[in-house]
Amino acid sequence: MIIGSGFGGSIPALRLAQNGKKVLVLEQGQAHAEKDLKQSYDPKYLVTINQVVPSDDYAVLYQSGMTLGGGSVVFAGLMNRAPSEVFQFVDSSGYKVWPDTVTRQAMDPYYAMVEQMMSVRQATWDEVPKTGGTFARMMDTMGLTCDRANYPYVNCRQCGYCEAGCIYGAKQDLMHNYIPQAQAAGAEFRTGCIAMAIMPATGGYSVQYMDPYRGGTSVQGTVVILAAGAIGSAAILLKSRQYLPQLSPQVGQNFNNNGDLILAFELPDGWPSVEYYKGRANAGVMTYAFWDEYRITIHTGTGPPGIFSGMNVHRPGELPWGLGFKQWAKEIYRSKFIGGVVIGLVTGEGYVYLSNDSPLVHFSPVTRSYTDYTNRVVSVGNAIAQANNAILLQTRTNGYEYASAHQLSTVRIGDDPLRSPADPYGQVRGYQGLFVSDSGSIPGGTGVNPALTIAANAERITDYIVNTW
Ligand SMILES: Cc1cc2nc3c(=O)[nH]c(=O)nc-3n(C[C@H](O)[C@H](O)[C@H](O)COP(=O)(O)OP(=O)(O)OC[C@H]3O[C@@H](n4cnc5c(N)ncnc54)[C@H](O)[C@@H]3O)c2cc1C
Ligand code: SF4
């Protein structure tokens, strides 16, 4: 049995069904066919396909897909392999977070399986929106390079609504490959079903869940795979602690935001218009130019004008509201604004906990190691701005926005039983046959957007389950 139908859930569903296992997937969201999706960023629509969990100081809203196919339906599609150094990362306490057996070399065959299944390929320059081209030019001014990034897109129309779900079927999300193939192999996907708790039962585990038609009910499985996302999987285990007393106290700990930080720039006069509102949600390029020195990558996006109010984008020293701000935003949005996401290797210092049975995230980026990281990123942002006569904008009041879609590590795998709630194969310590295969199992930052690594790791974990159960 599998809880969640995103990357961590649909991949085991297919591989186990192909190997003749009886598979049931519980998914709390509904199935959305292309005709049910909308080209809209209206929050009233977005809440039908997303879940939002706040940080406990309400400074960040952590977003994730809540639909059959999970995050794959709402993600922007950037799918690059993690650089080799990611798998050797040692955190600020001196702990090497990835198991010794899981290296980039060991992951490569699994990366290749996902890329083949999801038709991932490198974008051509013709497919790179102007925002991406402009960012590449900014790097070029500094004598640095940008790579075209990899995406699972076929016949993309560059409409820009990838994060609302692709109505054209161009984005090869899990609804185009793993899920229909798993169904054809006999797996059942039960939607609208919210898993509440897991308890040991004869020959395996019983999962309690809320069914839209039958109310509270339960189902039994020999093997249970948690794939409800980094926040969801941790929350289910925390709710189950009374039934699973040997669970590691590390469950919910080590929350990692993948080092996401938003940098934005105002370009000087004389540059061709950026047309920030045009093209795919993810603007097609990624720079590794700062990787060796800072262990960060930067990629750019496109976006609707709401970005100015939603993120408080403003010039340093000026107000992010008022008439002057409105005039400035109107002037720069179309032609001179460019925003990018920095991703980098940081120690996972947050945690997920339950408040009245609902998950909350505690993430306070004021520790020494996180402040040093932020300062290093801002120094890179200033260098880019200076080289291009641009202005590094602030993306939240007196600071920089932490992007909120790459939650990781809350039930991390690892070699050290005291530091990792799951073993290197995703088996929850103390509980044979209970696995975690999603973003929660990824033990540290991925250096790039995480979906491809989450998916490849799910293939790796499933390989182990197929061969041992
Ligand atoms: C707007 C947006 C853009 C993104 N863009 C990119 C990108 O370009 N590249 C990239 O690499 N990553 C991107 N991501 C991140 C990526 O989508 C996630 O890292 C990835 O989907 C996580 O995979 P997962 O399997 O851990 O969980 P998910 O894909 O989130 O799947 C978890 C599933 O479990 C279900 N679930 C949760 N709790 C329960 C429960 N109690 N019972 C039953 N079901 C439950 C959820 O509804 C969901 O469908 C983006 C995310 C968002 C939100
Ligand atoms: S930009 Fe391409 S992939 Fe994204 S929603 Fe539009 S057609 Fe689909």
Image: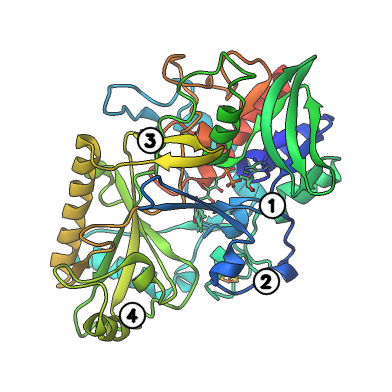
In the picture of the structure, the residue carrying the numbered disc 3 is 86
Amino acid on which disc 2 is placed: Tyr
Quadrant where the image shows the N terminus: top right
| C-beta proximity under 8 Å, tags 2 and 3 | no
In the rendering, at what x and y percent does residue 440 appear? 52, 35
Seen in the picture, residue 208 relative to 298 is either above or below; the reply is: above
Dividing the picture into quarters, in which one does residue 42 lie? bottom right
Q: What is the crowding at mark 3: few (fewer than 14 residues within 10 Å), some, or many (at least 20)? A: many
Element type where label 1 sits in the image: loop
Q: Which numbered mark, 3 or 1, is in the foreground of this view?
A: 1
Seen in the picture, residue 127 relative to 54 is either above or below; the reply is: below
Q: Residue at x 45, y 31 (%)?
A: 443
N-terminal of the pair, mark 3 or mark 4, is: 3
In the picture of the structure, the residue carrying the numbered disc 2 is 168
In the rendering, at what x and y percent does residue 33 appear? 74, 63
Q: What is the crowding at mark 4: few (fewer than 14 residues within 10 Å), some, or many (at least 20)? A: many
In the picture of the structure, the residue carrying the numbered disc 1 is 29
In the picture of the structure, the residue carrying the numbered disc 4 is 333
* Cβ at disc 4 under 8 Å from ligand 2: no
Element type where label 3 sits in the image: helix
